[in-house]
Image: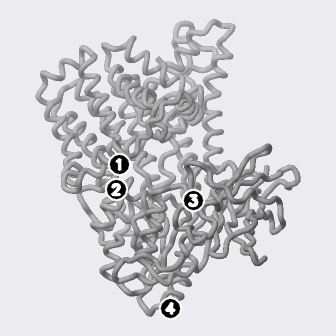
């Protein structure tokens, strides 16, 4: 079936001119759309802030291995190849990712032409440029585009293998699957979808008697072997991260609603419904045809995440995107039938609904572009727009700009050769790529590194805290510490900071940097690494005397009766805590609290009133002007002297 001009149907006008002309004209249209999208994504790639995963892949690639704690070796080794040729620069990595993503429409055509007409295969390729989950890949150096490309190629080869049973297509199917597994563990899910196809369909069940099917499975499994060896010899970090630690099982129907809202919003309602209808049609109505293969694989991938969504709080929005790769091959027929089978009175309405899909897709693309632009310009955009930045994708360049000055201060205090050390792997990668000086940072073992098992990699690279001790014992170190949101309310963070206080001495704050839109604060300290860890003899500067838990940094204050809280301590005691907004007293806190089940930590026991050192307060937002404000605390001692601190940016809509 073909897409026909408005008002034409196969029954009434079999010789009617197809929409946008013959196949050659349609190819030209597809290439034009692809070129526009390519340069659109190139603009985003040039403009968007680096994300930590890009640094993660690049830094990991400097240490070639069979695998890494959270991922197989594919993308780190690919980044190593690129940086070896083009230098330590983010742009070549993003350009490579963009080129990979630009091949997806051709791979979709290859896949679709094995199961639908050539005309529909061309439309499927064009739709893969229009449907956001398939078209948005390539703006950052991330595996999603490569996984989508390999899945389309794998299914295209498998469809041909099912048809002619040649070793060429079986071998290429296994090769694509092996490469997918060498890039990311998520490629196991499409593989499971193929197995499901072989179990549920009559044509699939014949495969179990075909030796080539088993050989293909062995070839595919070879892509997983390096990761298995790495994990088996490193206490299974990927299992600990992806299976044990990462899932957040908290059943709540709102998670399912959020999952569907995300997928429908990103995919657009028109294309989302068309994709699922195409899958259902292939699985139920065409289960004896080759269309059943992409239908089963696509619905299985989506269904797996859909069934998890009510319980797994941390499902990432892009994880189900692979489901849309096989299903897009079947969408042109669904959209054509939707229009062709309409009663004459509804034809134009249905044509308008189909046309709405690309319009909404462009709107999603504009939204993504605006979002990336807003992050790149978070310091200068209007304050009310900053509420739209819901992810942590700050530009860490302001921190990089201060590190040399902090290093000079450390060497002034403790001699030459000061080391650079960051709390953990994620903030380290923010600094390491794209650092033009190509500096690598020691990591100090923050709790998240244990959670993710990134400490396994840093230890093998000689960039963990024990390696720092071996190379810089008794020497100066610059400590780079992103401030935890709830330090005194998180036992794991308290233990981490306590250990830092045991390992370092003469700790001196150097500078605190707020990264726009001011949700993340990074504080630089200079210190000396003790030869032997020991308890601090004085109050450790890493533990703030004035502490705010609520409101969080960069938050938009709510109108009404919101209650905020924190702690304040001093060796002389505290008699009063005042809340300052833009340097003026906004309210007085209710000080001297000791809430049951949330006692103040013992590191603040130097205050004579401990543990009754907590406070809460309210803020009357009615008199605050809309926009950005500076919130801070002022504590008064018994002798009347005061100390100020815990400052942070807040906003009012």
**Residue 451 horizontal/vertical position (percent):** 39, 53
**Residue 311 horizontal/vertical position (percent):** 46, 32
Task: Please name the residue that numbered disc 2 is placed on.
Answer: 453
483 vs 439: above or below? above
Give the crowd class for mark 3: few <14, some 14-19, many >=20 residues within 10 Å.
many
Evaluate whether residue 142 shows in this view.
yes
Q: Is residue 473 left or right of residue 93?
A: left
| Circle 2/circle 1 CB separation < 8 Å | yes
Task: Please name the residue that numbered disc 3 is placed on.
Answer: 600
599 vs 9: above or below? below
Give the crowd class for mark 1: few <14, some 14-19, many >=20 residues within 10 Å.
some
Task: Please name the residue that numbered disc 1 is placed on.
Answer: 241
Distance from Cα at disc 4 to Cα at disc 2: 34 Å
Which-is-in-front pick, marks 1 and 3? 3
627 vs 580: above or below? above
Quick one: label 4 or label 3, which is nearer the N terminus? 4
Task: Please name the residue that numbered disc 4 is placed on.
Answer: 413
Distance from Cα at disc 4 to Cα at disc 3: 34 Å
């Amino acid at each position: 079936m073909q897409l026909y001009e408005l008002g034409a149907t196969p029954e009434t006008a079999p010789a009617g001119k197809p929409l946008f002309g013959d196949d050659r004209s349609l190819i030209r249209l597809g290439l034009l759309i692809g070129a526009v999208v390519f340069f659109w994504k190139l603009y985003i790639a040039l403009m968007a802030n680096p994300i930590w995963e890009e640094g993660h892949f690049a830094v990991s690639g400097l240490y070639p291995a069979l695998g890494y704690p959270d991922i197989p070796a594919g993308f780190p080794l690919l980044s190593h190849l690129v940086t070896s040729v083009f230098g330590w620069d983010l742009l070549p990595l993003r350009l490579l990712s963009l080129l990979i993503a630009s091949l997806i429409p051709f791979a979709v055509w290859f896949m679709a032409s094995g199961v639908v007409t050539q005309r529909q295969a061309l439309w499927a390729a064009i739709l893969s440029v229009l449907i956001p989950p398939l078209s948005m890949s390539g703006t950052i150096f991330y595996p999603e585009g490569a996984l989508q490309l390999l899945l389309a190629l794998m299914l295209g080869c498998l469809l041909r293998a099912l048809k002619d049973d040649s070793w060429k297509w079986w071998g290429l199917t296994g090769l694509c699957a092996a490469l997918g597994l060498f890039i990311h563990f998520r490629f196991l899910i499409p593989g499971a979808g193929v197995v499901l196809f072989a179990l549920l369909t009559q044509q699939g069940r014949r495969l179990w008697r075909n030796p080539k099917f088993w050989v293909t499975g062995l070839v595919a499994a070879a892509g997983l072997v390096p990761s298995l060896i790495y994990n088996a010899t490193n206490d299974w970090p990927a299992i600990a991260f992806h299976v044990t630690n990462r899932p957040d099982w908290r059943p709540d129907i709102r998670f399912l609603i959020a999952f569907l809202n995300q997928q429908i919003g990103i995919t657009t309602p028109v294309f989302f419904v068309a994709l699922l209808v195409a899958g259902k049609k292939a699985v139920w109505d065409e289960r004896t045809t080759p269309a059943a293969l992409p239908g089963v694989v696509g619905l299985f991938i989506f269904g797996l995440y859909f069934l998890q969504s009510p319980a797994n709080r941390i499902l990432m929005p892009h994880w189900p995107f692979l489901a849309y790769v096989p299903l897009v091959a079947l969408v042109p027929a669904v959209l054509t039938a939707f229009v062709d089978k309409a009663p004459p009175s509804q034809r134009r309405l249905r044509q308008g609904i189909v046309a709405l899909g690309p319009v909404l897709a462009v709107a999603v693309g504009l939204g993504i572009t605006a979002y990336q632009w807003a992050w790149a310009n978070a310091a200068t955009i209007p304050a009310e727009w900053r509420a739209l930045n819901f992810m942590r994708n700050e530009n860490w360049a302001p921190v990089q700009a201060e590190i040399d000055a902090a290093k000079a201060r450390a060497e002034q205090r403790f001699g030459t050769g000061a080391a650079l050390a960051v709390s953990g792997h994620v903030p380290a990668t923010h600094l390491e790529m794209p650092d033009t000086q190509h500096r690598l940072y020691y990591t100090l073992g923050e709790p998240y590194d244990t959670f993710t098992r990134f400490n396994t990699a840093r230890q093998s690279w000689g960039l963990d805290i024990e390696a720092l001790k071996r190379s810089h014992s008794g020497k100066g170190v610059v400590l780079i510490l992103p401030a935890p949101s709830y330090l005194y309310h998180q036992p794991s963070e308290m233990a981490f900071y306590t250990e830092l206080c045991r390992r370092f001495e003469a700790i001196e704050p150097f500078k605190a940097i707020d990264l726009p839109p001011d949700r993340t604060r990074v504080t630089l300290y200079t210190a000396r690494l003790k030869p032997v860890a020991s308890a601090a003899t004085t109050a450790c500067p890493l533990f703030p005397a004035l502490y705010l838990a609520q409101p969080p940094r960069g938050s938009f204050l709510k109108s009404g009766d919101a209650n905020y809280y924190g702690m304040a301590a001093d060796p002389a005691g505290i008699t009063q805590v005042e809340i300052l907004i833009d340097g003026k007293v906004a309210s007085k806190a209710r000080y001297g609290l000791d809430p049951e089940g949330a006692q103040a930590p013992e590191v603040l026991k130097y205050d004579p009133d401990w543990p009754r050192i907590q406070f809460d307060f309210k803020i009357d937002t009615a008199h605050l002007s809309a926009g950005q404000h500076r919130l801070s605390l002022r504590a008064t001692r018994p002798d009347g002297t005061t100390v100020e601190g815990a400052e942070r940016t807040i906003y009012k809509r």
